[in-house]
Image: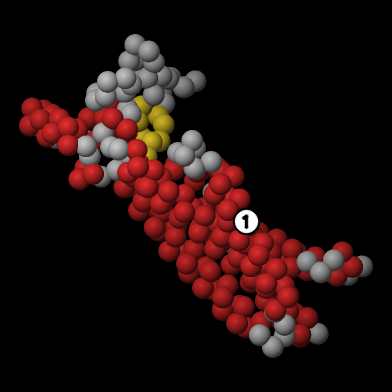
Amino acid sequence: MHLSEYGPFANVVAIAGFLVATFGILLLKALGRMNRWTWLAGSDQAPGFLVAGGARILAVALMAMTYVTIDAKNYLWFGGSAIIFGIIGFYMVARFDKLRKLYVLQVPLVGPGGSPLLNKKGKPTFASVVIATEDKMRDQAKQALAAARQKSGGVSIGQFMSGYGATKVNDPEALWDRPVLVENSTKLTRTLMYLTLCGVMALFVASFAIDVYMRKAK
């Protein structure tokens, strides 16, 4: 029984599965699960369905366009586009890593009395929050940070944030205006969407180009 009997996408799905299995170390282990990435951007600000859903909506439209336009005469162009998607995806991984290091800070989780919350192994637990750069701090917070550094020496943003704020500890909104934090969170989310889209399309277009080539060679 031939795979084509299961529908027009059967061969493409089979080839895509082969590519995922072959390049799993590069694709799956490098990117990881989507909830791993969205957690870094802040799950409350960038839920997984926004990142994955937005990318998939556009990916479906591009897949449909690929399906109705690819043939034995132009499949090499689609193979080239798969390479371009891969290059852009590589760039997006590097860009997200840079944004993560700039705008995502791990802060310790503490209880009502200020004591650190421990996991089952007795180690302190942390959460990731979106922050901004020092030059975008509120004037009052910037002055307080300068005073803390003058008094205690090299005080990091994380150390300063853990003791600053009227209502709760480790609150980024005590240091930065909310629109600034939302802008940085949006940058992270948008980069994740581009990264997801490029990964899906590179895999799909490459699979389709290989399928057309195999059919042509018969």
Which residue is labeled 1 in the image? 56
Number of numbered discs overlaid on the protein picture = 1
Vertical placement of residue 31 versus 161, above or below: below
Vertical placement of residue 52 versus 78, above or below: above
Picture residue at 28% right of the left edge, 30% below the top: 174
Vertical placement of residue 135 versus 8, above or below: above
Considering every residue shown, the one lying at the far left of the view is 150
Considering every residue shown, the one lying at the far top of the view is 113
Camera-side residue: 84 or 56? Answer: 56
Considering every residue shown, the one lying at the far right of the view is 1
**Taking 182 as reference, is 198 left or right?**
right
Label 1 SS: helix
Picture residue at 33% right of the left edge, 29% below the top: 171
Camera-side residue: 167 or 107? Answer: 167
Q: Which amino acid does label 1 sit on?
A: Arg
Considering every residue shown, the one lying at the far bottom of the view is 73
Vertical placement of residue 4 versus 172, above or below: below
Is residue 3 in sight in this rendering?
A: no
Picture residue at 32% right of the left edge, 40% below the top: 131
Q: In which quarter of the image is the N terminus?
A: bottom right
**Residue 20 location in percent, x, y?**
64, 60
Picture residue at 81% right of the left edge, 85% below the top: 218
**Residue 66 location in percent, x, y?**
67, 73
**Residue 13 location in percent, x, y?**
74, 63
Q: Which colour scheme is used?
A: secondary structure
Is residue 185 in sight in this rendering?
A: yes
**Taking 210 as reference, is 173 left or right?**
left
**Residue 160 location in percent, x, y?**
22, 30
Camera-side residue: 166 or 152? Answer: 166
Q: Residues within 10 Å of mark 1 (few under 14, many from 20)?
A: some
Residue 64 is drawn in which quadrant? Answer: bottom right
